[in-house]
Image: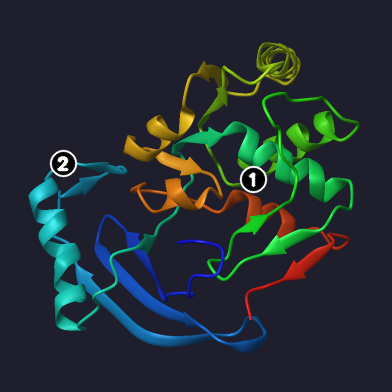
């Protein structure tokens, strides 16, 4: 899933209390999408009650039916994220949003991720856009209904402790449901967790199980973003 990898189709999966619905889309030119498959399968009563899965085996079998019947072989699915917790690749996400706010070039890759040319080189420096970037990320997490966010930063990077303090000051001021941890290697945790992660690191994306493109969601809604499109 590197910078110049091909864009794949995506499958949207809606797990409801009465039915499982799946839709497979393929990206076309000019932001359009082509419908490849659309399927719905009734779900047995009491399998899911009030948003809680009571019979996982039945749910799994029901999910498999529309995939098998319609020959949907895509392994990656997009589902609703509201009510979920996420783990954020701290420097990866923050620095890209900072760069975008500063009008630096942001590159749209063929995997749909936005990436920048900024680097920390062993030391992070707070910039004019830092607070605004954190607040913008917070606003978008809230709009998506994320219930908790865990930020992971590299402990070997200088000023990570100061950045952690800045974020916790904002957390206290705004009552955001966030935690911040400093790890020797956040990529290891991001790659192995079963929680939803937020990153544009291609190595981590190749290994993770669940992911949302929050940076793309944010930048895609910014009219003045300085985007260089490398996706075509």
* Residue 102 can be seen in this image: yes
Secondary structure of residue under mark 1 = helix
From the viewer's perspective, is residue 187 above or below residue 75?
above
From the viewer's perspective, is residue 185 above or below residue 222?
above
Secondary structure of residue under mark 2 = loop
From the viewer's perspective, is residue 53 above or below residue 227?
above
Task: State the residue at coordinates (45%, 34%).
Answer: 187
Residue 85 horizontal side relative to residue 200, left or right: left
Q: Give the image location of residue 44, x and y in percent.
A: 12, 59
Residue 6 horizontal side relative to residue 170, left or right: left
Q: Give the image location of residue 162, x and y in percent.
A: 73, 12
Q: Residue 54 or 68: which is nearer the viewer?
A: 68
Q: Which residue is mark 1?
A: 143
For label 1, count other residues whose C-alpha is less than 10 Å away and answer few (under 14), some (14-19) or many (20+).
few
Q: Decide: marks 1, 2 in contact (CB < 8 A)?
A: no
Task: State the residue at coordinates (67%, 44%).
Answer: 140
Q: What number of labels is visible? A: 2
Asked where in the image residue 30 lies, by quadrant, the reply is: bottom right
Q: Which residue is mark 2?
A: 54
Q: Residue 48 or 90: which is nearer the viewer?
A: 90
For label 2, count other residues whose C-alpha is less than 10 Å away and answer few (under 14), some (14-19) or many (20+).
few
Cα–Cα gap, marks 1 and 2: 28 Å
Q: Give the image location of residue 66, x and y in percent.
A: 20, 75
Q: Earlier in the sequence, mark 1 or mark 2?
A: 2
Rendered-image quadrant of the N terminus: bottom left
Q: Give the image location of residue 141, x and y in percent.
A: 62, 40
* Residue 142 can be seen in this image: no
Rendered-image quadrant of the C terminus: bottom right
Identify the mark at residue 21; answer none if there is no mark.
none
């Amino acid at each position: 899933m590197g910078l110049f990898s091909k864009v794949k189709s995506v499958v949207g999966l809606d797990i409801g209390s009465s039915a499982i619905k799946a839709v497979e889309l393929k990206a076309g030119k000019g932001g359009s999408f082509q419908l490849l498959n659309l399927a719905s399968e009734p779900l047995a009563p009491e399998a899911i009650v009030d948003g809680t899965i009571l019979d996982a085996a039945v749910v799994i079998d029901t999910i498999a039916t529309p995939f098998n019947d319609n020959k949907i072989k895509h392994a990656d699915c997009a589902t609703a994220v509201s009510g979920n917790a996420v783990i954020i690749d701290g420097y990866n996400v923050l620095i890209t949003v900072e760069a975008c706010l500063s009008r630096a070039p942001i590159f749209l890759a063929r995997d749909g991720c936005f990436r920048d040319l900024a680097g920390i080189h062993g030391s992070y420096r707070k910039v004019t856009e830092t607070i605004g970037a954190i607040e913008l990320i917070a606003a978008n997490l809230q709009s998506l209904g994320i219930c908790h966010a865990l930020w992971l930063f590299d402990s070997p990077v200088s000023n990570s402790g100061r950045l952690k303090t800045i974020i916790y000051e904002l957390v206290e001021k705004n009552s955001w449901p966030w935690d911040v941890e400093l790890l020797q290697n956040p990529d290891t945790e991001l790659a192995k967790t079963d929680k939803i992660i937020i990153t544009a690191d291609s190595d981590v994306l190749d290994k993770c199980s669940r992911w949302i493109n929050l940076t793309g969601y944010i930048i895609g809604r910014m009219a003045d973003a300085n985007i260089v499109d490398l996706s075509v």
